[in-house]
Amino acid sequence: MTPALVELRRVNKWYGRYHALRDVSLDVYAGERLAICGPSGSGKSTLIRCLNGLECHQSGTIRVADHTLDGDPARIQAVRRDVGIVFQQFHLFPHLTVIENCTLAPMRVRGLTAAQAADAAFYYLDRVQVADQAHKYPSALSGGQQQRVAIARALAMSPKVLMLDEPTSALDPAMAGEVLDLVHAIADEGRTVLCVTHDMAFARGLAGRVVLMNAGILVESNRAAAFAAR
Amino acid sequence: MPRDTGRRAAIAIACALALPLVWLAARWAVVDAVWTVAPGGSSAACRAPGAGACWAVIADRHRFILFGAYPAGEQWRAAAACLLLAAAYAVAIARARWTPGLLGMWVGVQAAAILLMAGGLAGLPVVPAEDWGGMPLTFVIATASFTLAIPAAILLAFGRRSSLPAVRVFSTAFIELVRGVPLVTLLFLGSILVPLCLPPHLVPDKLLRIVVTFALAVAAYQAEVVGGGIDGVPRGQREAAAALGLPPWRTAALVVLPQALRSTVPATVNTFIAFFKDTTLVTIVGLFDLLGAAHAAIADGPWVGFGVEVYLFAAAVYGLLCTAIARGGTHIERAAEWRA
């Protein structure tokens, strides 16, 4: 069996005295679609924030694409090149146009030329169907469009893993269905997708593996079909 | 009686009472005013009984008030320097020109204005900085010190928020010390103490010392303005940049700073206007800015005692310039909106 792309072993995380992650162990393999479900405050967002070094775990090991996260800034940078994240509130850069949002990091981090970065950005903006908005500022876009831009921005860095934090929470149900289609399309290209959600229907729709979190404990890991059957 | 009618009646009565005052002011300022006297002439006409405002003092002394001790035959250079700087401001507030090239233009125009005033090349006679005065002095001190202060303020603001203790302590100490000392004291330190502490051949030019002193003061105040802007940028912005792999300093320069500066435009204009007016404090260390020159114009000679007229003139000039700065600030604020 190939080694896991993302590997967590007995990871613990405290905020002060609050124990946010308790002995979390998890393997995610390349090309997998994984939904992390659980109620608010269960630690699922903390988990994905630890996966790209936005938060530091205090014990256990996290390995992403052969890099071990141990607090070394260089390794955190290396992991961040392989892990894209779409935040719950999108966090687009308001002072940059859509296309500038999508080319900033590819140019400054990956060292692409402006033309290369724009080509790549337009490819992904087209994939998420907002290419016609490329020269607008984020404030001129609807919530659904902003999320698509956020997805394109993350994909423009060609990460091995795409993580989405509550992708449906800011959208109406019809839009949520479209996002689901989009995530499927992205996963079908062979990209690994990790999705944090409290929306069980969305998790089922992702039709991959589902893990549950509660009070910082990864309580169950199951195939979606079995999960749906219960 | 309905309230509205009562209010109108009250306003009518107030106007009727104010009318004589308006008439008195108009008589003093316009009807009875003395507008001109023979060139180099005496102030006798202004001192005649029944004479109103003596605008002749402005007509006679306006070049000294506007340009101080700058040699009369060379004052076109000082005027040209002012126009050059004013034009640079007008050019710089247009968003289409906010490119890295603008910084070069900005520094180039200031160097040109200062060289034009200093002379010593292209056949222009040298005018030492001690002879500079009036409006050009105000313009040069305000523009040069702000240009030096803004980058320093940005570095101090980030420095105060740095995770490196030495940088943080230095920035905090600098800001608090400079803000804690009155500007007048700083000017005395810069103009009197610095020359005492250095060997004579190392003492920089007095105007340069004053510009640097102003720059340090502006930097300390402006650092807190920029800092407020930095703190106002949502944490999610930094996280989004970090998650994309941008290192901290690129995040600061490309994501945090542009948003911080945008939100601090009104407060920055505030700082600029405050220090623009504070340039008058250079009088106490022996330079004649516009207000100092106005004061000196009536200190002796035929025009002693016509303070109201020259101070009104100076107030009008400051009022005009500060209004222009405020309008420019509003323009920048509107131009900086992120809407396509």
Image: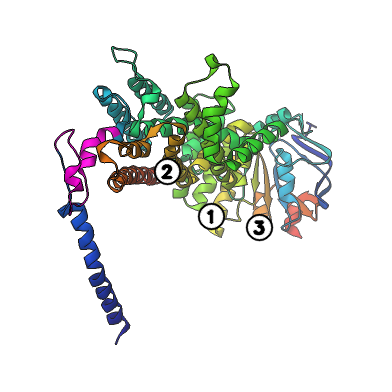
Identify the element where label 1 is drawn: helix
For this rendering, which residue is in front, B315 or B150? B315
For this rendering, which residue is in front, A224 or B141? B141
Identify the element where label 2 is drawn: helix
> Can you tell which of label 3 and label 1 is closer to the viewer?
1
Residue placed at 22% from the left, 67% from the top?
B19
For disc 1, the marked residue is A175
Q: Are marks 1 and 2 on the same chain?
A: no
Check contact, mark 3 vs mark 2: CB within 8 A: no
Q: Are marks 3 and 2 on the same chain?
A: no
Disc 1 from disc 2: Cα separation:
50 Å
Chain to which the residue tagged by mark 1 belongs: A
> Can you tell which of label 3 and label 2 is closer to the viewer?
2
Residue placed at 70% from the left, 40% from the top?
A54
For disc 2, the marked residue is B273
**Is there any visible trace of residue A156 in the rendered image?**
no
Against B85, residue A138 (above or below) is below
Disc 3 from disc 2: Cα separation:
59 Å
Q: Quadrant of the C terminus of chain B?
A: top left
For this rendering, which residue is in front, A32 or B328? B328
For disc 3, the marked residue is A201
Image coords of residue B286 (percent x, y)? 43, 31
Residue A128 placement, left or right of B105 = right
Residue B59 placement, left or right of A9 = left
Under mark 2, the amino acid is Ile
Question: Which numbered circle lies on residue A41?
Answer: none
Question: Residue B320 lies in what quarter of the image?
Answer: top left
**Is there any visible trace of residue B75 in the rendered image?**
yes
Residue placed at 33% from the left, 21% from the top?
B116
Question: Residue B166 lies in what quarter of the image?
Answer: top right
Question: Residue A199 lies in what quarter of the image?
Answer: bottom right
Chain to which the residue tagged by mark 3 belongs: A
